[in-house]
Amino acid sequence: MTIKKLSWVVEFTGCPAIIKRCPKCGEKMRFICSEDFRINANKNKLDVWLIYRCEKCKATHNREIYSRVNPKSLGREEFLLMQSNDGSTARKYAFDKSLGAGKAELDYSRVEFNITGENADVSCPAEIKITAPFAADVKLISIIKGKFTQNGEPVSQSGLLRLFDDGIITLEGYEIGKAKLKKEMIIMVNSGIAM
Ligand SMILES: [Zn+2]
């Protein structure tokens, strides 16, 4: 029996918002990422921020990405990507909750993504390689749930979790219920394979 090789590529088309108090609105608001950087060069040190705006009043919040770093430690390529407000570079930082002083409260509720690659039929053995531009604090199941079919029909999320429970589908190294998206993950469809 041959095992089909599938490749799924995840691409985020938006960023998580930040939840913080807006000084103008006077309450906690969602701040939307503009995907633009602000860079200050001061002698041999760089400060870099990612610019967010309050959803309601458009007040600006500069989220610290780098503070007083040596440009060399950043690398020229990364610097140029930030200087040109490269969208995928902005998203890489926007998804990183550990950046800057004090952890940001990120809101993933409206993050949009695409996942490309041929859907997997759960009755055919397959090895599925999932790649993403960066690891993200987003549950894998919410990203892959629409990618499986059975008899030509899409498999529901609960149906998919049952297939994982039964070992028909397995995720290497992680528990599907808790797994967050990593840069590279492997899922096996084991139907018809003696285990
Ligand atoms: Zn506001």
Image (cartoon, helix red, strand yellow):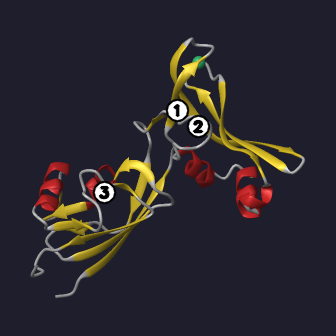
* Mark positioned earlier in the residue sequence (1 or 3): 1
Task: Check if mark 1's residue and mark 3's residue have beta carbons within 8 Å.
Answer: no
Q: For residue 60, which quarter of the picture?
A: top right
Looking at the rendered image, the quarter that the C terminus falls into is bottom left
Determine the residue located farthest toward the top in the rendered image: 26
Residue in the image at 45% along x and 63% along y: 183
The Cα–Cα distance between marks 2 and 3, rounded to whole angstroms, is 25 Å
Q: Give the image quarter of residue 126.
A: bottom left
- Type of residue at label 1? Ile
Q: Which residue is mark 2?
A: 33
The nearer-to-camera label among 2 and 1 is 1
Q: As drawn, is 185 to the left or to the right of 62?
A: left
Residues tagged 2 and 1 counted as in contact (Cβ below 8 A): yes
Q: Residue at x 53, y 35 (%)?
A: 104
Residue designated by label 1: 18
Q: Which residue is mark 3?
A: 144
| Left or right relative to 102: residue 47 | right
